[in-house]
């Protein structure tokens, strides 16, 4: 006790950790913590759909967070989302959702609207992101997906999102908040994002998992 001891050097990225009382410390891989980056990606030009998080939704994490940056549609129109199961999008008429969005436009014209969808085949989560015909601004959003892989007790998958479309140089700017669910139970393997019409031509996403 009290005598110095030699410790082997570790590898790049490792940290020095305790091995317990009476034992020399050792270099080990750093813990990922409770909030872990799982996936990131870039939208390919002229994409009719974008699949996000596929294969990363497991029982390891209780909550998932998806961040979308500057998703640019080719035309103005709603952008929608579907849950995936086993690698395929769920297309049944089981989606229920509500979107609330406020718009401010040049000239001081403001508007607030809401829309409910029941028995739909997808969730409308970003309404008219290319408002004013500006397809260069795109939209940004943060999405919370709780308990995607939970099967016991069985729960319906849920979706919460907020974001904005347009910007300072666009004719209008719109903020939106969306909630939704799929009226069936079962583990969700990922999500699919797609526009009402046209394609998605640019954008980036990141997926994080939060342990319980």
Image (spheres, grey):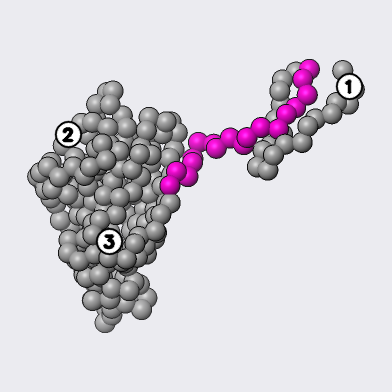
Q: Secondary structure at mark 3?
A: loop
Q: Position of residue 173 (x, y in %)?
A: 30, 70
Alpha carbon distance from label 3 to label 1: 64 Å
User: Which quadrant of the rendered structure holds the N terminus?
Assistant: top right
Alpha carbon distance from label 1 to label 2: 62 Å
**Of callouts 2 and 3, which one flags the residue occurring earlier in the amino acid sequence?**
3
**Looking at the image, which is closer to me, 24 or 98?**
24
- Residue 36 among magenta residues: yes
Q: Secondary structure at mark 2?
A: loop
Q: Residues within 10 Å of mark 1 (few under 14, many from 20)?
A: few
**Magenta part of the chain:** 22-39
- Residue 41 among magenta residues: no
Q: Position of residue 147 (x, y in %)?
A: 33, 34
- Circles 1 and 2 in contact, beta carbons < 8 Å: no
Whether 127 is drawn above or below 105: the answer is above
Q: Is residue 160 left or right of residue 99?
A: right
Nearer the observer, disc 2 or disc 3? 3
Residue tagged 2: 184
Residue tagged 3: 47
Q: Is residue 33 left or right of residue 63?
A: right
Res 102 quadrant in image: bottom left
- Circles 3 and 1 in contact, beta carbons < 8 Å: no
């Amino acid at each position: 006790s009290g005598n110095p001891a030699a410790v082997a050097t570790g590898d790049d990225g490792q940290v020095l950790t305790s091995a317990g009382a009476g034992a020399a410390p050792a270099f080990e891989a750093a813990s990922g913590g409770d909030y872990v980056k799982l996936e990131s990606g870039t939208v390919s030009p002229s994409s009719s759909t974008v699949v996000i998080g596929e294969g990363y939704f497991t029982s390891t994490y209780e909550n998932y967070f998806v961040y979308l940056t500057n998703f640019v549609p080719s035309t103005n129109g709603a952008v929608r989302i579907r849950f995936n199961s086993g690698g395929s999008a769920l297309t049944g008429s089981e989606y229920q959702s509500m979107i609330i969005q406020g718009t401010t436009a040049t000239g001081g014209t403001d508007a607030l609207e809401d829309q409910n969808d029941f028995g739909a085949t997808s969730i409308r989560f970003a309404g008219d992101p290319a408002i004013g015909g500006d397809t260069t601004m795109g939209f940004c959003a943060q999405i919370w997906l709780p308990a995607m892989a939970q099967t016991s007790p069985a729960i319906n998958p849920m979706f919460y999102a907020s974001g904005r479309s347009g910007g300072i140089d666009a004719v209008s700017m719109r903020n939106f908040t969306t909630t939704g669910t799929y009226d069936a139970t079962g583990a969700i393997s990922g999500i699919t994002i797609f526009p009402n019409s046209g394609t998605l031509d640019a954008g980036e996403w990141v997926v994080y998992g939060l342990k319980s």
